[in-house]
Every structure is written in C-alpha cells, then in structure tokens.
Amino acid sequence: MSTRRKFIASTAAGLAGLAVPSYGLAATSSPVTAVGQPLVISTWDTGLAANLGAWKVLRPGGRALDAVEAGVMVTEASQNCCVGLGGNPDRDGIVTLDACIMDEKFNCGSVAALERIKHPISVARRVMERTPHVMLVGEGAQQFAVAQGFPLEPQQLSADAAKAYKEWLKTSQYKPVINVENTGSKKPVGPVGGANNHDTIAMLAQDAQGNLSGSCTTSGMGFKMRGRLGDSPLIGSGLFVDNAVGAAAATGQGEDVIRIAGAHTVVELMRQGLAPKAACKAAIERIAKIKGAQARDIQVCFIAISAKGEHGAYALQKGFSYAVCDAKNQQQLVQSDFLLA
Ligand code: SD4
C-alpha cells in the first residue's frame, strides 16, 4: 500500500493571467476545505491546467457548474491531450466523444458517441438546460449540437492519434483492458508515458456558496468497438452529485465502473458517513471483489468531495493522481493511494 504523497507540480504554472501562489508542501492530514472556500479537484495530471480554468470562475465567487464546464474545456481544447478531438479513435478510425455534467439540483445532461464537436461538455450542458432530456447520443447529439451553433470540426485524427491508430492496426487486437492509466507492466498501444496522455478528465467543484457540481469528458477507451460507451457519459457511473452529501467521479475501465454504478455508490457511501477517500476505497474494494484475479488487468479510480469540503480519492492500482486547487494552493497534485500492492 502506498502512503499519500503530495507532489508539487510545475507543468501548468505558466498559464496566462492566473495568480498562482508560491508552491509549498501540503499538509498530509485529511484534506478539508471549509465551506465558503471554493475547491476544485480533477483526475490525472491534466487536471492541473483544467483546475486553473475552473479557478478563474470560482475565485471571484462564480458558480461551481460554470467552473466545471470551463475547467474541462481547457483539456478538451488541448492539442497535447487524448481528451477531446485529439483523442484516440475507435476501431474504425473515428473519434467519438462522451461527456456529462451535473449541478447542485440534480439537473444533469449528457452526450455520447458524439463526433466532430470540440466541446462535448458544453453540448451536455445544453442538453441539460435546453431540452427535456438528460442524454443524447450519436447522430442526434451531433444534430442538436449543430442546431445549437457548435461548429462541425473536420473528421481527422491528431498526429499522435493517427500514429497510435496505425500502430494498433498492425495487430488490430481488441483488448478491453485499460491502457494509458495502467503504469504496470502492460505496454499500451499508442502514445503513452507523458503526463497528458489520459483520455478522460473528471472534475468536481464546490463554490463559495457551498454548492457542488461535476463534469466528465472523454474520447473513451482507445480503439474501442464502434458504438461502445463507457461510464463517462453515464450519470451515476462516471459522475454523480448530491448537494446535501457530496460528489464523485470515476476514471479508468468504464465497464467496471458501470457494473457498480460507481460514482453514485461513492456518494451513497458518503451519505452513510464515510469520508471521501474511505468511500472511494470501499467502492474500489467492491470492484476488486467482483473482478477477482482479473482486477490486476484493469485500472479504476474514483475522486470525491463531500458537502463539508473534504476531498479524497482511491485507485485499484498504482499510478493514479488527482489535481487539487483551492485558495491555498492552485497547483497541487496528489498521488492516490491504491488497493493492489
Ligand atoms: C471509459 N472511463 O471510456 C473511460 C476511460 C477513462 O482515462 O477513464 N480513461 O471507459
């Protein structure tokens, strides 16, 4: 079992226009941000830059919902990241995107298998705010996006994705095994190893009013079957928010998050009194029990914040980190504890 360590990150320090306080070692005790003090957390190293986007909204007193949309838009727009249109395609060479968003009043919106749209998270928000529905998929989601004024981007792979796809085509082996997250012995196909290669970002925020919101956006598992959806666009699996209790989100092998309705499970465990990290751990243990020996082949990770402003995370395997941003430190990367030593 690892011990929690906090890393001081430098990758996004230069982001324009943001007052980033001097870096310092964070306390190792259970992290709590008092209600009234905004807080945003997000998955993986890419969360550092995304959190700064969210912080621009939270710092002047903005709404958590606006923050979690603005935050993950940074990642969706990044050229150096597998989230968004730069992500790996499905087996047929087409990039399909999934995203969802949820606010403090159980309002939620989602898009899945969306093609050629740069900001699926914003389309998910429009589904939430401008339709009587929660979820739109595929062609219908794209039609809605275009009707809402989102431009159709060209159907083309980023240079990294094209390279990875070419490599994958050599074997065309379909392995529903998480790749980029697993820092263990399995060598993933495609670009790997850099801080920016994760294909999902999930973000949770609490604003100065104490309200919670969350967002999640992904290109999904690289080289997936056409039509395959993971947990990320599913409210209750990839993301869940109950303002009275807390919020949780997932990354990793979507199929196994769906199996236990992961994010909802974490929130319900917090409702029963567990702190965020303990709730994430209990959900991971549930997955490990279901998977048995196969648990070693996958990675699943949860992040959570409570209505009290505590945050925590837990992963099945080594290698998961999450980014934390609050009034004290906007650039903190926390290495998550994990179950399988
Ligand atoms: C999925 N949960 O599509 C996503 C993948 C992921 O970092 O989180 N990758 O299953």
Image (cartoon, rainbow, N blue to C red):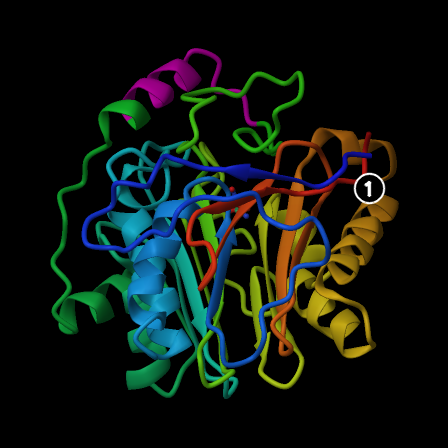
Residue ID at (63%, 18%): 186
Query: Where does the magenta region start and end?
Result: 162-174
Quadrant holding the N terminus: top right
Q: Residue at x 43, y 47 (%)?
A: 331
Q: What residue type is disc 1 on?
A: Lys
Q: Is residue 195 left or right of residue 269?
A: left
Determine the image quadrant of residue 215.
bottom left
Residue 61: image quadrant is: bottom left
SS class, disc 1: helix
Label 1: how many residues lie within 10 Å, few (<14), some (14-19) or many (20+)?
A: some
Q: Relative to residue 248, is residue 168 drawn left or right? A: left
Q: Up-down: is 214 above or below 82?
A: below
Residue 62 or 293: which is nearer the viewer? 62
Q: Quadrant of residue 330?
A: bottom left
Q: Residue at x 72, y 58 (%)?
A: 30
- Is residue 38 placed above or below 244 in the rendered structure? above
- At which x and y percent is residue 9? 45, 37
**Front-lying residue, 140 or 26:** 26
State the image coordinates of residue 285 (x, y, percent, origin top left).
83, 50
- The residue under label 1 is 291
Q: Main secondary structure of the magenta part?
A: helix
For the residue pair 115 and 22, the one nearer the viewer reads as 22
Q: Position of residue 130 (x, y in %)?
A: 28, 84
The quadrant the C terminus occupies is: top right
